[in-house]
Image (cartoon, grey):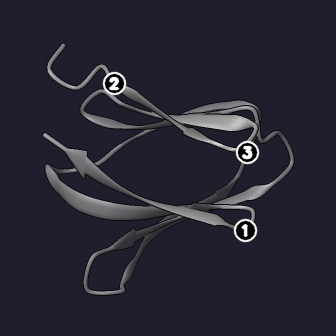
């Protein structure tokens, strides 16, 4: 697939595969924002989470860490 890189975020990984996959943060709240600050999604992690998003730039907040990601 086009986006197969992983970016470490402390004890979790954020992977890009036409969406956002977060692993390693079971029980924590995950927030995904558009770059203009609108909340795109929020959910309580089950440990291995995958959410599909339209192509674009997003900010993913897990715990105290925030990462900028591109979904293509």
Q: Is label 3 in a helix, a strand or a loop?
A: loop
Q: Residue at x 18, y 51 (%)?
A: 54
Between the residue at mark 2 and the residue at mark 3, the CA separation in whole angstroms equals 20 Å
Residues 49 and 2: in front is 2
Which residue position holds label 3?
45
Whichever of callouts 1 and 2 sits on the residue coming sooner in the sequence is 2
Q: Residue at x 19, y 13 (%)?
A: 1
Residue 45 lies, with reference to residue 6, above or below; the image says: below
Q: Is label 1 in a helix, a strand or a loop?
A: loop
Please, which residue is most extreme toward the right here?
Answer: 27
Mark 2 in CB contact with mark 3 (< 8 angstroms)? no
Which residue position holds label 2?
5
Question: Left or right: 7 with respect to 38?
Answer: right
Q: Characterize the local packing of mark 2: few (<14), some (14-19) or many (20 or more) Cα atoms within 10 angstroms.
A: few
In which image quadrant can residue 44 be found? bottom right
Residue 18 drawn at (x, y percent): 24, 33
Which residue position holds label 1?
64
Between the residue at mark 1 and the residue at mark 3, the CA separation in whole angstroms equals 15 Å
Please, which residue is most extreme toward the bottom here?
Answer: 37
Whichever of callouts 1 and 3 sits on the residue coming sooner in the sequence is 3
């Amino acid at each position: 697939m086009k986006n197969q890189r992983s970016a470490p975020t402390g004890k979790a990984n954020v992977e890009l595969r036409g969406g956002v996959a977060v692993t390693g943060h079971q029980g924590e709240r995950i927030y995904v924002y558009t770059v203009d600050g609108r909340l795109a999604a929020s959910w309580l992690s089950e440990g291995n989470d995958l959410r599909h998003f339209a192509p674009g730039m997003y900010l993913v907040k897990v715990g105290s860490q925030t990462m900028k990601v591109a979904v293509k």
